[in-house]
Amino acid sequence: MATVLDTISFNEKKIQEIVKKTKEHALLHGIVMRTEELPASSEKVQYAPFALFPSLVPRKALVKVKDIQPHFNKMMHMVAYDMEFLQRCLSNVVKVDDFNKRLWDILQVVTEEGIAQPISLGLFRNDFMMDMKKGASVDPASPASIPDSIQMKQIEFNMIASSFAGLVSPLYDVHRYSLTLAGKQFDDLQVPSNNPAKELAKGLVEGWKAYGNKKACVVFLVSDPERNTLDQRRLDTEMFLCDRTVPVKYVTLKDMTERGTKRISDKTLVIDGCEVAVVYFRTGYTPEDYRSDKDWDTRLMIERSKAIKCPSVQYQLAGTKKVQQELCRPGAVERFIKDADVALSIRETFAYQYSLDMGEDGDDAIAKAIADPQNYVLKPNREGGGNNIYGDDIKPFLTKIKNSMERAGYILMERIQPWQQKNYLIKFGLEVSLRNIVSEIGIYGVYLGTADTEIYNSLAGHLVRTKTVGTDEGGLVIGLSCLDTPFLID
Ligand code: ADP
Ligand code: MG
């Protein structure tokens, strides 16, 4: 099976030595998170789970998804500002899904009273897996060779709280170190430098500038406790390096409820006496983030204010699984992207996705999934991991809901068969051994604009998350996957 180590082999003693030194290297580079025991404290932290070596990624495949990222950014922005399209996508979801209904209602309120802030800011992450077509083969004589047919297939497009830019930014450097310890010959361009934290921070600074008041602050709206707080902190550290005059505050929804206000006269959002230029949401994407109606009132207050939202409520709704499924329909991408070649490049990354709305097409999709559940993933319109239904669980679940409107809250997706490799995973409390793994590649992007004007649009680096074969979900903070970087091969 493929591995970056190719023909290099080690004894146990050598591997333990590489692990020990690389762990310390990771700690020195700040690849750290808070512990499960003390999730609210930075007094004692541990290294975040990471792959000991980078995982193989075909250079061409990575270049392709990086090249189209600015077009993806623009398309998702246009989707969010196309009320007719959004309404068509989500009309059945909001009938059965209270969480998305509440977001939808907020969008109706702000649209009716006139949007206070025409600009939206997006710090996106577009996730892909390296799909192996059925029957694809690897040359057994060269474990590092690229299988004869690998295609990047999109898993999802994250429009809220896209994480791990902070933790992954120093990892390419750690991987250059571990490879060197292992005696691997490589060119630095094969483990490319990467700083998504800096690029996303630049996006936040651009948003702040577009707001146009140097005294106004950028609010990181966060959960408490939050194990992944250091990932967030690297973004504001990078903001500091970019422009140290930008005031930054960390605020929870509860703080905003208790101490935030929207001035009636000019819709300015204010917290602790400071005008807010940008609200950067690192919370607010799951129902649990809103502990009461008061938190929902606070979300509404933020959306009605003239602060720039990252993301605005319409961005958040455009990021739902349902919208992504609807974009797979013929003509949908082309509604937004007029250049046929670009539209095709985007479309080529799509796996098959099916609506489960009531009706014949939905019935057919359900029958397909029940007959062959290993080839599908069932997704509700939720973010943050742990919500999808896989394999053997699909049949009983669909059988239960197939005659109820509830099914419109889900979409069905073809299951990607990702390229399997071998790597060592370093996780707190887990024995280190060579494991069969698969990887998910995230491409970061930044977009800033109004309905018809683009202010800023950039490709912002990459992330790889790697998990053992047989793990369905990919949650990193909960320990299912590990931070990783690409080792590019031709
Ligand atoms: P979430 O919003 O919870 O992150 P995702 O759509 O990203 O939802 O799915 C979570 C994880 O499930 C992904 O990180 C990936 O590992 C796996 N997954 C999702 N869709 C597919 C698919 N079509 N084929 C294979 N694995 C998938
Ligand atoms: Mg995901």
Image: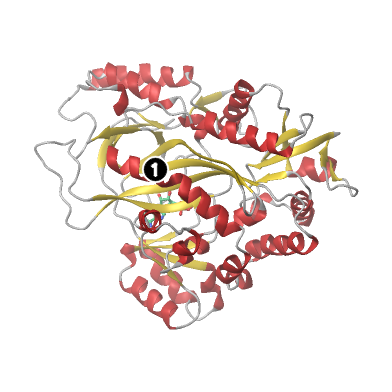
Crowding around mark 1 (Cα neighbors within 10 Å: few <14, some 14 to 19, many 20+) is few
Q: Give percent across and percent down for residue 444.
A: 48, 40
Which residue ends up furthest to the left in the rendered image? Answer: 141
Residue positioned 70% across, 52% down in the render: 290
* Left or right placement of residue 49 versus residue 142 in this view: right
Closer-to-camera residue (190/100): 190
Q: Name the residue located 34 percent from the left edge and 18 percent from the top edge.
A: 177
Q: Quadrant of the N terminus?
A: top left
Q: Which quadrant, please, contains the C terminus?
A: top left
The answer to which quarter of the image holds residue 338 is bottom left
**Rendered location of residue 24, percent (x, y):** 42, 17
Q: Quadrant of residue 65?
A: top left
- Residue in front for this viewpoint, 23 or 316: 316
The relative height of residue 374 versus residue 279 in the rendered view (above or below) is: below
Extreme bottom residue here? 360
Q: Is 206 left or right of 147, judged from the image as shown? A: right
Establish if 361 lies above or below 140.
below
What residue occupies the far right of the structure in this picture? 265
Above or below for 205 versus 121: above
Instruction: Answer above or below: position of 65 versus 215.
Output: below
Whether ligand 2 has any atom under 8 Å from the Cβ at mark 1 is answered as no
Three-letter amino acid code at disc 1? Asp
Q: Residue at x 64, y 61 (%)?
A: 99
Residue 96 rendering spot, x and y as whole percentages: 61, 71
Q: Which residue is mark 1?
A: 67
Residues 233 and 113: in front is 113
Q: Position of residue 93 (x, y in %)?
A: 58, 69
